[in-house]
């Protein structure tokens, strides 16, 4: 039945009057982001007139974790799906830990070459300061 038009309830006295289905509204960007099963928002959050369909997936969570998800979504004024989508998006945007380690090592080598303090130097200074403070 998707994509077909159905009669409007009450019809306003006009025979054959129809209203657009949800699929029609999605194609024209007339749906809201919440509760429709479809989203007219772009990845950056704007609606820009473009539409995209979203997939529904089934995932399993322990009851206590799901309760925390629901509570957090309610506190933030969003849906369970919205909260989980944001969490997945953030996780996927995180930098690769190995790439981060390599970048830090590169900066450490650069600091050592130019005589700048390295993280080891800074940690040693902190330790000295803390020991000095403990003796006071």
Image (cartoon, rainbow, N blue to C red):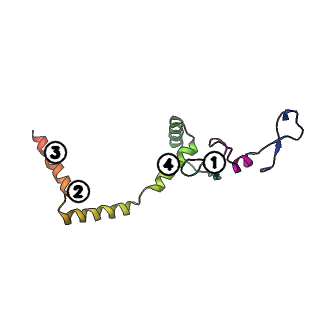
Image location (x, y in percent) of residue 100: 35, 60
Q: Which residue is mark 1?
A: 40
The residue identified by callout 4 is 87
Magenta span of residues? 22-39
Out of 51 and 57, give the one closest to the viewer.
51
Q: Secondary structure at mark 1?
A: loop
Q: Position of residue 38 (x, y in %)?
A: 66, 48
Residues at discs 3 and 4 in contact (Cβ within 8 Å): no
Q: Which residue is mark 3?
A: 130
Q: Are marks 1 and 3 in contact (CB under 8 Å)?
A: no
Q: CA distance from mark 3 to mark 2?
A: 16 Å
**Dot label at residue 119:** 2
Query: Which residue does the image show at 38% across and 60% down from the upper left?
Result: 97
Q: Earlier in the sequence, mark 4 or mark 1?
A: 1
Cα–Cα span, label 4 and label 1: 20 Å
3 left or right of 117?
A: right
Pair 3/2: label in front: 2
CA–CA distance in space, label 1 to label 2: 47 Å
Which element is circle 3 on?
helix
Contact, CB < 8 Å: mark 4 with mark 2?
Answer: no
Q: Earlier in the sequence, mark 1 or mark 2?
A: 1
Which residue: 30% across, 61% down? 104
Identify the mark nearer the N-term, 3 or 2. 2
Q: Mark 1 or 3, which is nearer the eye?
A: 1
Along the line of sight, which residue is nearer the eye, 127 or 115?
115
Q: Quadrant of residue 63?
A: top right
**On the picture, is 66 further left or further right than 115?**
right
Q: Report, in whole angstroms, how far the alpha carbon at label 3 lies from the one at label 4.
A: 38 Å
């Amino acid at each position: 039945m998707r994509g077909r038009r159905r009669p409007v309830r009450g019809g306003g006295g006009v025979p054959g009057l129809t209203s657009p289905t949800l699929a029609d509204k999605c194609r024209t960007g007339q749906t809201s982001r919440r509760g429709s099963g479809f989203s007219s928002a772009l990845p950056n959050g704007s609606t820009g007139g473009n539409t995209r369909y979203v997939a529904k997936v089934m995932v399993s969570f322990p009851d206590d974790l799901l309760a925390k998800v629901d509570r957090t979504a309610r506190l933030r004024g969003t849906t369970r799906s919205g909260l989980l989508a944001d969490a997945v998006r953030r996780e996927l945007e995180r930098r690769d830990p190995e790439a981060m380690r390599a970048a830090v090592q590169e900066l450490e080598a650069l600091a050592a070459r130019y005589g700048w303090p390295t993280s080891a130097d800074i940690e040693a200074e902190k330790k000295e300061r803390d020991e000095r403070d403990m003796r006071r």
